Each structure stands twice: as structure tokens, then as C-alpha cells.
Image (cartoon, coloured by chain):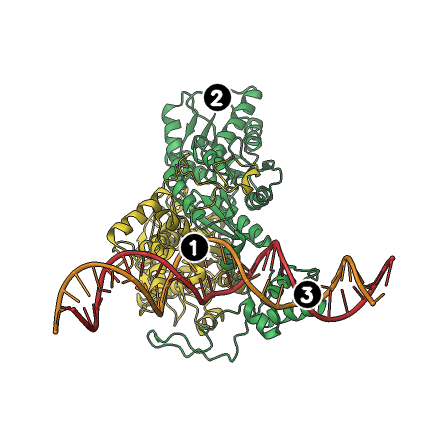
Chain colours: A yellow, B green, C orange, D red
DNA sequence: CCACCTTACCCAATCGATTGGGCGGGGGAA
DNA sequence: TTCCCCCGCCCAATCGATTGGGTAAGGTGG
């Protein structure tokens, strides 16, 4: 139901502008009340319901609703007058808003921003509009933003900020609210994520192969499945290869640069043996880690290897290009929407895990 | 009109985790139709219009609409039943949606993402909801997204992707659509921006003072006022100080890392005299520039100085910390909303230019 | 005692689109 | 010829909230 309307706002349409509203500062061509289905109907001399049925039946000729000829005339006039359906009016009647809500920790996190771009794109293809709000990974904000979105009557929700120990998701499920998870998974709920365990394994393989035997992990937040899975994938594979991981070599921390540098500080202070490689579960944490290592006088890529995760565009452009696990962020966003569509259609849904691959660069070369 | 609804969701079902997908999905407590104003009215034995008036008159006692006692009872029940107004129903009647639309080049640009966080925050304070879409700086997309938002009946628009040579803004103005600009300005339209000219001047002062005499600029896209103003601020001040800028030392390019490295390549190839300092009008371009310089064997901060713009969080954390002009991104977003509010209220509006300051770091120290 | 005003409500139309139920007329089948 | 069905369309209720216009009851002033 898209009407290609280029809006050449020309002088056409006699559209006797109603006398009252004229004065308002803006000039004549504006303030023009949007075209309604009733306008179309009266100009065509038919009933609004017929117009609705025609426009609603997309390609087919609205069997039983109107003749092919009438349908053609309706569609033609709709295009000519630049008719756009009024979503809230339709929504009021149908109970659906064609709105999807997304909640992410923060849009200024490039990873989530890119996923949201995918969400927006995929939503648009399905004639949905998407909405996004930031929760700062704070449970209170999460709840508050969720309620705002529900008050807006979104048809479904996409959460990019699921906490492994959170109580919100089970609660929403109990309330029968359609939602899916994105980026982070949570057992029992459909999610679109990167195969984070595989990602961690790739890093383990790579570093092992490069001859490293002492490694450390900046593991991210313990409440996020991303950090947990990437870390466990790494650790388990490492052990499978015969490697050893010191206690204290895995440090939980923020996903941002500050978190990364703090994690490295901690590792350097507490490690019994100096690691020769650091795996940060996020590029920004990796950048922070590189900064901290450098200020300790270590040259990354030479004295010590660093590997990040997500392969954000800067990774390759850093002064010392950063090895990173490439995750399909845009696709994860799109997959989340597809998943949500299934949930809304009450189809069966299996979580989606998209495959990452490793980009080796100077920081671990 | 915010009702604090805490949703303690009753008996705390121990979340019978679904084996596969438990298609039944929703249980009795859900599927519960949201509370309407009519529900409240009938439970209180009064008319819906009275309820509406009470809830609508916020703090006052709705003079003439209801007694203080009735008002109290209404509000109490509303809170108890977790009544939330139905925005599209209200919007249908009032013609306002309490929706703001924002259009940005891309949310994965940290600068815009942060500004949008400001937009969202400020909008929420005014009981508006904000919407965002990406235009990729493509005029066609810009138009398309604008129409989608208008079809959604947003009350006003915020553009973060204004082109100096664009035709969309004048057209929207002619159509009487309320909008403001953010980040980039455009003569004749209200905008909330950083004082980019001042920003450029700060950089010129700094580099001049550090003794540099040969400089180059990675100037960003020529259609964006940000790049243009930062560059002209820099160039004019530089000349005012007695400096000289070679033709070919100012290179227009993308705002991203790729753009920055390309700009540097161009500069190095065409410059008559090697610059000792590079001003990139964007941190990401600066990072790209640093990468390109490094691969030419130059050590940033030693052989050559680099200064960026926006002071994004990574700037300080880079292996070679980047000097950058700090611009108040969050505040710009908030200011844009305030400005739009004025436009919507038909108050007079002056563009807002927020002051930046320079953060000097190793890359130019 | 009456006119008048205020208080505290109720009534009903309205916004734009959707949708179940009709209904007349024409054509095919029996 | 008669009955029935289907085509093509109309009617009217409906979604939830808002709002201009009442209207009774009670109080006040003259």
C-alpha cells in the first residue's frame, strides 16, 4: 500500500480551501488539509468503504468490492491527489499501528546503531515504521521506555539490551507482548544474534596458531550474552587446544573504550604471567585496551597482540589496524525484524545466529 | 499526562520455559485489552468526557469540568488501572500526534547518534516521541523519508542532513511544514549547530601557536555547512594570523575514515610543500588521516600534527590521543527540539550556535 | 421571590479508516 | 419462467479521545 506520490505541490487541485483556516502566516499552498478517503469517494461519486476496499486490496481487483474499472479510477485519483492513508485512523480501527519499537542500550554505540539501520530498512520493506529509544542498559530505563512504546501501541518490540539476569522479558512474555531480542540472546526467547561462541573460537584458533600461550580477555559486561558467549567460546576452545587460562586473566568490564583500558590495567596488575595477547570482546574496548597497553610502553602488534570484535569501520583504519571478528550487524538487525514478523504472525520462530569471520590485521599479525 | 504505572504483573509465574517454541505463547492474563477512558468512566459512573477533561487538566482541578473530589477519584482509578491514553485516538481528534521526526545521514555516525540521543531526551521531556530515519545524505532518500514521516503525521521534523544546495528545505517551508535543522545550518532556516566557524578558528590559533606554518585541511563534504564553516573559520583565521594556505591544501572529502585517508593521500600527492599539520573537520576523518600518514611512515604527533573535530569518546583513547574540538553534541540535539517547539508554537526562532572548545592532546602536542 | 450565575456534569458530533451486513439487478441454471 | 447466486456497491457501526454546547441543581443578589 505505497502510493508513489511525488508531491509536486503544484497549483492543481481546485480543492476549495476552507475559508476559516486561511490567515495562518504560512502561504496558500500549505495548510491544505491532507486528502482523505472521503475526499476520494465524493469526487468519484462512490462510497468511502468502496475506496477503502480497493486501496486495501493492493494488486488484486478487490473481488466483490468493486469493478476493475472502478478500482482503476480510485487508484488513479489516489495517486493524482497524493492520498496517503492516515495511520492513526487506520490503527484506531484495526488495533494495529504498523509501528515497531526498538530499545537499545545506546544509539551512540556504533554496533547498535548499525543494527538499527538494518531494523529500519527491513521494517520499511514490510511497511512498518520503526522507533528507537535508549535504555543505557539500566533496568529502570528499560522498563520505562518499554512502557512508553507500549503506550504508543507499537505492534511489537525489539530489544537490543537484554540482560541475562533481567526480569523484564519473562514479564513481557507473560503479558503476551510480541517481542524479539537482537544482538544479545536470552534462553527461551527468540533472538537474532551473531554466533558469538563461534566468534570467540575463531579468536582462540587464531591466537593459538600465532604461537601465543598466555592470553587475557576483556570480557565485557557479565549481564550481556555477547560478552559471556564470546568469552566462553574463546576460553573453551583455548582449553580444547591444550591451552591454559589463568584465573584473573578474564576481566569483566564495560564495552566502551574506558572499559577496555580499565580491563587491561586490572590484568596487568593481577596477572601472574604477562599475557602476550589480549582478546577484547568489542572493538571499542579493544581500542581502550590498546591505549592502556601503549601507555605501559608496549607496542601493540609487536610486544603484544590485540583482537577485537565486530570489525567496526574504524578497526581497519586505526594507526595500528586492529584484528577483529567481523559480525554482520546490519543483517542481524534485519533478521530481528523478520523474526518479529513471524512472532506477530504467530508462526513458529527459531532464534537466528549469524556467522562471523575473523579479519586478521597488524594488531595480531 | 504521565501515569506512573508500575506493572507488578501479578502472581510471578515461574516462567515455564518453553522447550522449543511453546506456540501458545500468550496466557490468560495477557491479551487484556488496554484500559480506555470509557472503562474509567463506567466504573466511576460518570461520563467519558468528564474523565477526559479531568485527565487533560493535569494539575488544576479542571475548573468547571469536575469537582475536586471527582477529579481525585478519576486520577486515582486511572493510576490503579494503569490507564494510558491512546495516542492515535487522541491524535485523530486533535490533529496532533506528539511525534517528532528526525532525519539524519546515518545513525552509525556517532556524531548524529549522540545528537539524536539529545533529541530523544528533550522530546520525552515535552511528552513527545521521536522517530529517526537515515537518509545516507542522498537527496532522494531524504525526500522519501520525509514523506514517510509526513504520512505518519509527525508534528514537526528535525533534519540533520541539510545540504547547502538542497531544494527540499525551501519546498517544505513553502508547504508550511514545521521543521528545524540540526548540526548543519542553512541560511534562512532555524538551526541548532555548533559554532563551527569558531571551532575552525580555535584550531588555527592552536596550530599557529605551536609553530606550524604549512597546514592542510581535510574539509569534509562541500554540501555540508559543518565542513564548510569549520574550514572557512580555520582558513580565514589562519590568513588573519599572517599564514598562507596553498591551493590544493584544502581537500573536500567524506566525513568517515575512508574520506580522511583519501584526503591525506590527495594532499600528499599534490602539495608543493609538505604540511606539518592536518586539520580534519571530523574525528573519523582524522583517524583515517592518521592511518594514511602512518602508512607513509610519518609518526603523528611527532613528524606531523593532526587535529580532529567533535571530540568523540575514542579521540582521547586512541593509541596516539587525538586533539579535537569538543562540540556539545547532546546539547545540540536538545537545542534542536527546543527550537522546534518554538516553531510549533509559532514563536519567533533564532538559530542556536553552541560554543565548542579545543582539547589538545598528543597528536598535536 | 425571581433573575442570574456558577458548578458539575452529560450529550453527541467528530477525527479517518475499516468491516460485517445488506441490497438491487443481472445472468445462469433448472 | 422461476429461483438463486454473485457482482458491485452502499450503510452504518466502530475504534478512543476530544470538545462545543447544553442543562439541571444550588447559591447569590436585588
Q: Residue at x 34, y 45 (%)?
A: A77
Above or below, B274 against B154 in this view is above
Q: Residue at x 46, y 58 (%)?
A: A104
Name the residue nearer the viewer: B200 or B265: B200
Let me know if marks 1 and 2 both belong to one chain.
Answer: no
Q: Chain of mark 2?
A: B
Above or below, B161 against B48 in this view is above
Let me know if marks 2 and 3 both belong to one chain.
Answer: yes
Mark sitting earlier along the chain (2/3): 3
Q: Chain of mark 1?
A: A
Q: Chain of mark 3?
A: B
Measured Cα–Cα span from mark 2 to mark 3: 73 Å
Element under label 3? loop
Query: 10 Å neighbourhood of mark 2: few (<14), some, or many (≥20)?
Result: some
Query: 10 Å neighbourhood of mark 3: few (<14), some, or many (≥20)?
Result: some
Is residue A83 at all visible to an observer of this figure?
A: yes
Above or below, B49 against B276 in this view is below
Q: Which residue is mark 1?
A: A87
Q: Which residue is mark 2?
A: B245
Measured Cα–Cα span from mark 1 to mark 2: 55 Å
Residue B47 coordinates in the image, percent (x, y):
60, 68
Measured Cα–Cα span from mark 3 to mark 1: 33 Å
Q: Which residue is mark 3?
A: B66
Specify the quadrant of the image occupied by residue A91.
Answer: bottom left
Amino acid at each position: 500500500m505505497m502510493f508513489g506520490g511525488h508531491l509536486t505541490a503544484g497549483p492543481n487541485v481546485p480543492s476549495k480551501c476552507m475559508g476559516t483556516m486561511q490567515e495562518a502566516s504560512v502561504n496558500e499552498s500549505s495548510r491544505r488539509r491532507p486528502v482523505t478517503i472521503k475526499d476520494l469517494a465524493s469526487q468519484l461519486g462512490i462510497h468511502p468503504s468502496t475506496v477503502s476496499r480497493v486501496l486495501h486490496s493492493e494488486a488484486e481487483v478487490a473481488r466483490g468490492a468493486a469493478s476493475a474499472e472502478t478500482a482503476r479510477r480510485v487508484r488513479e485519483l489516489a495517486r493524482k491527489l497524493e492520498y496517503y492513508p492516515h495511520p492513526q485512523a487506520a490503527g484506531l480501527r484495526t488495533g494495529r499501528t504498523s509501528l515497531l519499537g526498538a530499545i537499545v542500550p545506546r544509539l551512540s554505540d556504533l554496533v547498535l546503531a548499525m543494527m538499527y539501520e538494518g531494523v529500519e530498512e527491513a521494517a520499511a520493506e514490510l511497511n512498518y515504521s520503526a522507533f528507537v529509544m535508549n535504555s543505557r542498559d539500566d533496568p529502570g530505563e528499560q522498563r520505562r521506555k518499554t512502557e512508553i512504546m507500549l503506550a504508543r501501541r507499537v505492534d511489537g518490540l525489539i530489544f537490543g539490551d537484554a540482560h541475562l539476569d533481567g526480569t523484564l522479558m519473562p514479564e513481557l512474555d507473560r503479558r503476551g507482548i510480541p517481542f524479539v531480542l537482537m544482538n544479545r540472546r536470552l534462553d527461551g526467547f527468540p533472538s537474532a544474534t551473531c554466533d558469538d561462541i563461534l566468534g570467540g573460537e575463531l579468536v582462540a584458533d587464531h591466537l593459538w596458531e600465532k604461537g601465543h600461550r598466555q592470553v587475557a580477555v576483556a570480557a565485557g559486561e557479565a549481564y550481556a550474552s555477547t560478552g559471556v558467549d564470546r568469552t566462553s567460546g574463546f576460553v573453551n576452545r583455548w582449553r580444547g587446544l591444550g591451552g591454559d587460562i589463568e584465573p584473573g586473566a578474564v576481566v569483566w568490564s564495560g564495552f566502551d573504550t574506558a572499559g577496555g583500558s580499565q580491563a587491561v590495567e586490572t590484568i596487568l596488575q593481577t596477572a601472574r604471567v604477562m599475557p602476550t595477547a589480549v582478546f577484547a570482546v568489542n572493538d571499542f574496548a579493544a581500542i581502550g585496551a590498546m591505549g592502556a597497553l601503549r601507555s605501559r610502553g608496549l607496542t601493540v602488534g609487536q610486544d603484544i597482540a590485540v583482537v577485537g570484535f565486530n570489525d567496526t569501520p574504524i578497526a581497519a583504519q586505526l594507526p595500528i589496524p586492529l584484528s577483529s571478528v567481523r559480525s554482520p550487524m546490519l543483517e542481524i538487525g534485519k533478521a530481528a525484524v523478520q523474526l518479529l514478523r513471524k512472532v506477530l504472525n504467530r508462526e513458529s520462530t527459531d532464534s537466528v545466529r549469524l556467522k562471523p569471520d575473523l579479519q586478521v590485521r597488524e594488531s595480531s599479525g
